[in-house]
Amino acid sequence: MRRWVLAAILAATAAWGAWTLVQRRREAIRQNREIAWMAAYQGATRAFYGADYPVAEKLLTDVLPETETLHPRDRSLADVLTMLGTSYSLEHKSQQAEPILKQALEVYERISPPDLLGEERTEITLGGIYEDREDYAAADQHFSKALSLSDQMPNGPTYERGNTLLHLGFVRMVQGRYPEAEQLLNGSVEALAPDSSAWAQRDLANAFYRLGGVYDAQDRYSEAEQQYLKAMQVQEKLSGPSSPELRGTLQGLAQVYQDEGDSAKAAALVNRAEKIALVPSANEASSHANSLLDRGAAAQNQGRYAEAESLYKQAIEFYKKDGEPEDPDLARALVYLGYLYRDQSQFDISKAGPLFQRALAIREKALGPEHASTADTLSDLSLVEFYEHNAGEAERFAERALPIQEKAYGTDSLPVSTTLNRLGLAERDLKKFAQAEVSLKRALAIREKNLPSDHPWIATSLDNLASVYLAEGNMGKAVPLMKRVQAIRAHSPAD
C-alpha cells in the first residue's frame, strides 16, 4: 500500500514539475514577445514624433496584431491605434484614419482606469478630420466631447484644452453662432497664451485671427482690428514676414479697414498680401491657382471688379488644366465668379446660374449630396433664381438646401437664416404668405440671437418680413418693422 502511495506522490511530483516547466517556458516566451513588442512600439513612437509618418505607419501596422493579442484591453492598444490614425490624418489619409480612430475610442471607453487625456486627443484628431471635410455637425460632436473630457481634468495639460476650444470656436463661427464662438475662442487664448512652444503659439495666433473674423462679422471693427494685429505680431515672430498664415491675417485686417471706409490702409495690406501670395510653395500649381482666387477676392473687396473677373477666370483655367474634372477647388473658383456676376450690377446675372450649376454638379459628385458646401451652392442658386424672377425654382433650391444646412451647421445657425430668408422671399412671390411669414420670422429670430441688435442683416430680415405684411395689406404689422429698419440703417448705412 505504501508503495502505491509513494508512486502516486512521485507521479504527482513529476507532473507538477512538468507543468511548472511548461509554465516557465510559456512565461519566457511571453516575456520575449513583450520585449520584442516594446522594441517595435518604441521604434514606431520615435518615427511618429520625428514626423517620419510613412515609417511610423509601417511599424505601427506591423505591431498592431501583436498589440491586439498582448494588450487587448489596456491603453497600449488604444495608444497604437490613436498614433496610427493620427499619422494617417497628418498625411491627409482621412479615409484610412477615420475607422482606426473610431476603434481607438472604443478601446478607450472600455479600459480601466480611464485614460481621459488619450481619449481627448483622439476626439480632437477625429473632429479635425470632419472639420476638414466641412462636416461641421460631426466635428462639433467630437470637439464638444473632447472639451467635456478636458473639463474632467482641471489640472490637465493646457495645450489640448486650448486646441479644443480653438477648433470648437471655429466650428461655431462657421455656424454663425458668434456669441458662443467668441466665448470659446477667448477661452482658447487664455489656455494657450502661457505656453511658449511653437505649436501653442501658432494656435494662439489662429485664435486671435478667428476672433478677428467673429468681431468683423458682427461689425465690431475696432475689436476685430485688435485681434488681427495680435495675430500678425505672433505670426511675424514665429514664421517671418512672408508666411501663408500672415497673408490670411493681412487680408482679414484689410477687410476691416475696407468696411470702415479706410481704402488706403486696406489697399496697402492687400498689396502686401498679394506679394506673399506670389511666393512659390511646394505645390506650385495649386499655390498659384489659390493665389489667383485670393487676389481676385481682394480685388472684388476693393471694388476692382473687372480685375477680379480676370483673376477668377485665370484660376478656373488653372484648375481645369491641372486638377481633376470633379475637383472641389474648381467648384470654389466657379462659385467666386458666380458671386461676382450675381452681386455686381455691372455684370450679366444670367452668367451666374450656369457657374453655380456646374459647381453644384462637382460638389454633389466629389463631396456628396448631403455636404454643407453642396447645400450652400443650392442656396446660392435659390437667390439667383429669385433675382431672375423664377420664384418656383428659387423655392425648390432653398427647400433642398435647408435640411442639409440644419444638419451641417445647426438649426439656429446663420447659414440656415440666409436660406430661410431666400425661401421666405420665394414663398412671398408665390403668394404663400403664411409660409413666408414662418420662414422669415425664424430667420429673424436666428439673427437676433447671434448678431448685435443693430446689425445690417437684422435690418434685412425685418425688411423682408415687412414686405410680406405689405403684400398682404397688413400695415399694422409692417410699419413697426419698417421703423426698426430705419433706426438700424440710420446708424449703419451699409446693408
Image: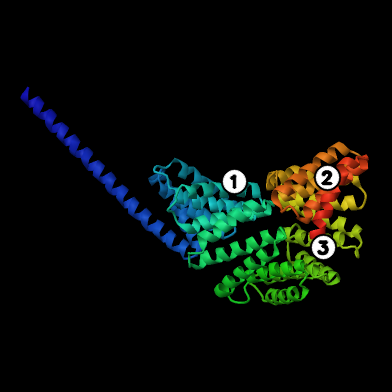
Q: Element type at marker 1?
A: helix
Picture coordinates of residue 409 (x, y %)?
Answer: 69, 48
Q: Element type at marker 2?
A: helix
- Type of residue at label 1? Gln
Picture coordinates of residue 135 (x, y %)?
Answer: 66, 50
Picture coordinates of residue 110 (x, y %)?
Answer: 44, 40
Side of 291 where 86 appears, left or right:
left
Q: Element type at marker 3?
A: helix
Mark 1 vs mark 3, CA separation in Å: 34 Å
**Residue depicted at x 37% and y 58%:** 39
Mark 1 vs mark 2, CA separation in Å: 28 Å
Disc 1 vs disc 2: which is toward the camera? 2
Please rate how many residues cluster around mark 3, counting C-alpha atoms within 10 Å: few if below 14, some from 14 to 19, many from 20: many
Q: Which residue is mark 3?
A: 337
Mark 2 vs mark 3, CA separation in Å: 23 Å
Q: Quadrant of residue 284?
A: bottom right
Q: Mark 2 or mark 3, which has the lower sequence index? A: 3
Please rate how many residues cluster around mark 2, counting C-alpha atoms within 10 Å: few if below 14, some from 14 to 19, many from 20: many
Q: Mark 1 or mark 2, which has the lower sequence index? A: 1
Disc 2 vs disc 3: which is toward the camera? 2
- Residue 399 in sight: no
Side of 368 where 227 appears, left or right:
left
Identify the mark at residue 423; answer none if there is no mark.
2
- Type of residue at label 2? Leu
Q: How many marks?
A: 3
Picture coordinates of residue 99 (x, y %)?
Answer: 56, 47
